[in-house]
Image (cartoon, grey):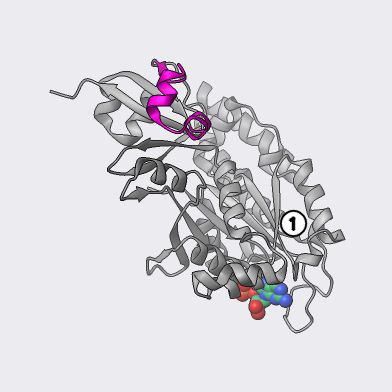
Amino acid sequence: MALNCGLVGLPSCGKTTIYNAITAAGAGSYDGAEMNRSVINVPDSRIQPLVDMYNAPKMVPTTLEIVDIPGLKEGSTASEGHGTKLLSHIKEVDAVLHVVRCFADENIPFEYETIDPSRDVETVDLELMVADSQTLENKINRLAKRVRAGDKDAIREVADCEKVLSALNEGIPARRQGLGNHEIQSIYDCHLVSLKPVLYIANVKSISEMEKEHVKSLQAIADTEGAEMIAVCGQDEADISQLDPEDRLEFLTELGFEESSMERLIRAAYRMLGLVNFFTAGEKEVHVWTCRKGDTAPIAAGKIHTDMEKGFIRMEVIHYEDLIELGSESAVAKAGKQHVEGKTYEVQDGDIVFIRFSPAK
Ligand SMILES: Nc1nc2c(ncn2[C@@H]2O[C@H](COP(=O)(O)OP(=O)(O)O)[C@@H](O)[C@H]2O)c(=O)[nH]1
Ligand SMILES: [Mg+2]
């Protein structure tokens, strides 16, 4: 199943507009659920050169699901029914694409009269934190009986929950609390929404506004928590995505872009999820696979087939750059740049792999 990212933000900040632009860029398929959600192909500029080199008739990219979540505003999460539903959508995503309105347009209604990214981010974060506090309090209450009975696990979990809760009450989202593994484990089943990794998206009017003050202030917010920020022109990109693919580049150039920022956005989302792409390539197909950063060779092999993990013998690895530089697998081998790796090897982004394994009996 594809990992997913949810578009979160105030009403009318441009979530649906950006959703349309992203899903068109990734050739998405709408699955008919109540919300806009679709699975997109993740662009990877290394695919085409590999397809050309191996003369492969087919390529299989990796995918990511994008969910367009209804707008959050002050008090949203407190409202019963609607709030609960909204939160369940956010709980379900692996990462948040937090869209912030950086364009001024008096014809488009907004919650506030001014444009102020830090106010907007705080408003959304506050809603997430209110919801998380409730979730933690519920868990603490649920464990109270076991705590009274002296259950050590319950006592430890409650202590961790209380620590996170008190930092939330001071206005620090869980993702900024510097939580250790121990605490993360204690709150794992709470699926806290303020713990999810965030990519900030500044939605601006035009390319000339990309360097402006609002974008800078959003960048500063992202920097303080070690997150990434991307500025996009949601409306322009959505308009362009409706054009025939051949015409898109021309319009992009006219507006001053070198490429669609949607690909950049998708790649950044992918990075945020801690994913790496590796490849299998041959004359039948070029196939992109995904594993997590730090996954060892057998685990990565298991993404291709469970037998490959169970019967793993070794992994023969070529780095993408070496292959492109030297022009063929055999040239890479001749140059002594094909690596034979064992069970402890951590697969790197861009590895082209061949797995030796003993098939299941
Ligand atoms: N001028 C301008 N309008 C935009 C931009 N992005 C979105 N809009 C408009 O803002 C309104 C709200 O956008 P929408 O994507 O529906 O917001 P959502 O509520 O966050 O999903 C729509 O009328 C869009 O056409 C932008 O970058 N510039
Ligand atoms: Mg919308």
The residue identified by callout 1 is 121
Please tell me whether residue 237 is drawn above or below residue 288 in the rendered image. below
Which region of the structure is painted magenta? 320-341
Please tell me whether residue 146 is drawn above or below residue 196 in the rendered image. above
Residue 118, horizontal then vertical, whole percent: 81, 57
Residue 296, horizontal then vertical, whole percent: 43, 23
Q: Quadrant of residue 318?
A: top left
Q: Left of 327 or right of it: where is 181?
A: right
Q: Left of 186 or right of it: where is 28?
A: left
Quadrant into which the C terminus falls: top left
Q: Hey, which residue is sitting farthest right in the picture?
A: 213
Q: Is residue 238 magenta?
A: no
Q: Quadrant of residue 80?
A: bottom right
Label 1 crowd (10 A; few <14 / some 14-19 / many >=20): some
Residue 193, horizontal then vertical, whole percent: 59, 49
Please tell me whether residue 206 is drawn above or below residue 152 in the rendered image. below
Of residue 60 and residue 296, the one placed in the foreground of this image is: 60
Of residue 260 and residue 163, the one placed in the foreground of this image is: 260
The amino acid pointed to by label 1 is: Val
- Whether residue 90 is visible, yes or no, is yes
Residue 126, horizontal then vertical, whole percent: 72, 54
Which residue does the image show at 66% across and 41% down from the upper left? 174
Q: Considering the numbered disc 1 on the image, is that residue within a helix, a strand or a loop? A: helix
Q: Hey, which residue is sitting farthest left in the picture?
A: 361
Which residue does the image show at 80% across and 58% down from the upper left? 215
Which residue does the image show at 49% across and 74% down from the upper left? 244
Q: Left of 161 or right of it: where is 29?
A: left
